[in-house]
Image: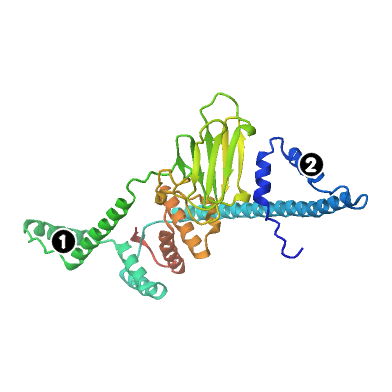
Amino acid sequence: MAGHDPEKFDGMFLAMCQRSEKGIDELLDCLFSFLVRKTDYYTGGSPGQAERMLMEHFKKYEKIAVKQKEEAKKEREEQERKRQEKIAKRKAEEEAEMERLRKEEEEPKIKEITDEEAEKIQKELEKVITDKETKKIQKELVKVITDEEAEKIQKELEKKKETPAADPEPSEEKTDEKSKENGDKDKSDEEDEADKGKVSPNAGNGGDMPNYRWSQTLEEIECQCWFDIKFPIKSKDCVVEIGRKHLKVGLKGHPPIMDGETFNEIKVEESTWTIDNKKYITLNIEKVNRMEWWNRLIMTDPEINTKKVNPEPSKLSDLEGDTRGLVEKMMYDQRQREMGLPTSEDQKKQEILGKFMKQHPEMDFSKCKFN
């Protein structure tokens, strides 16, 4: 049918489902009872026409439901396959990295080279790495000095200690750095001032209220509600209303524990509620805007500090290529530091030096220290 909107009556049907205490049987019974009482559906056409019409629509949507179920199953299987591939790939990379580090540890760290060989190394390094990297490696390459040179340096240091030096005047560079630090501190103070009065999010990035606790991801919210009662909760006792920007939860004969405007809009047709252990009402709410953190569930709730929200790591795959690569590099470097192993930058420098040493096996690096 042209212009037919299949979701036109979703709100009405959802309300009917919520009020049907016996489930789908009661809903269907009410529907066919309505057709008998208020229409000529059964008697207005030819014999068997009502049944044919019913089965035609039933078969149509049965095929759609089966197809959607199969597609969802295939999608889950594909996601699981990709997840297993990522796990296997990550494991292989970690094993290869550990093997490489083990081999590097077995290689000697100090090798001796002559002045001519050191000069030759310097020229080769300037060809393969940038000036910035050259300066870093120059600081890390420390040539072993003789006992006579060490004694001479020691005497010079002793002379400098005996001669008190005037206090140097602060340079413009240090003054600028200090001003910059003060500016950053002032900016941080302003940000802290703006966040005063806000509460920290709970472990689920949501808030804890006297009668309910809510948690969130970027896409959805889960809220568990409890009541000061001594009898098991049944669906007929519940008063739950989920609107596009309004929530109400309570029990008949009791004041609602939640009744107000929400922080942002809700996908009503994809949001549900259930009774858990006959003690709690759990709301599963789908957000319309799936790229924001809510700072409160109901507008009367205390505001949480969304800057302290801890995003779930399982969504790393949702990031764009460049951003994801940068985050993975930071996570890898953090793990390496915790294990006392070199970071990716340290490994890059070691790899450059390692390649050069392999290209020149005739050189003796035993008297060269590498930090």
Asked if residue 198 shows in the view, the reply is: yes
At label 2, the amino acid type is Ser
Residue under the image location 47 percent in, 54 percent down? 101
Quarter of the figure with residue 177: bottom left
Q: Residue furthest right?
A: 47
Q: Nearer the viewer, residue 42 or 215?
A: 42
Q: Nearer the viewer, residue 208 or 109?
A: 208
Asked if residue 117 shows in the view, the reply is: no
Task: Indicate whether 353 appears above or below 47.
Answer: below
Which label's residue is closer to the chain start, 2 or 1? Answer: 2
Which numbered disc covers residue 152? 1
State left or right for residue 254 relative to residue 25. left
| Crowdedness near tag 2: few (<14), some (14–19) or many (≥20) residues, C-alpha within 10 Å | few
Q: Nearer the viewer, residue 144 or 238?
A: 238
Quadrant that contains the N terminus? bottom right
At label 1, the amino acid type is Lys
Residue on which disc 2 sits:
33
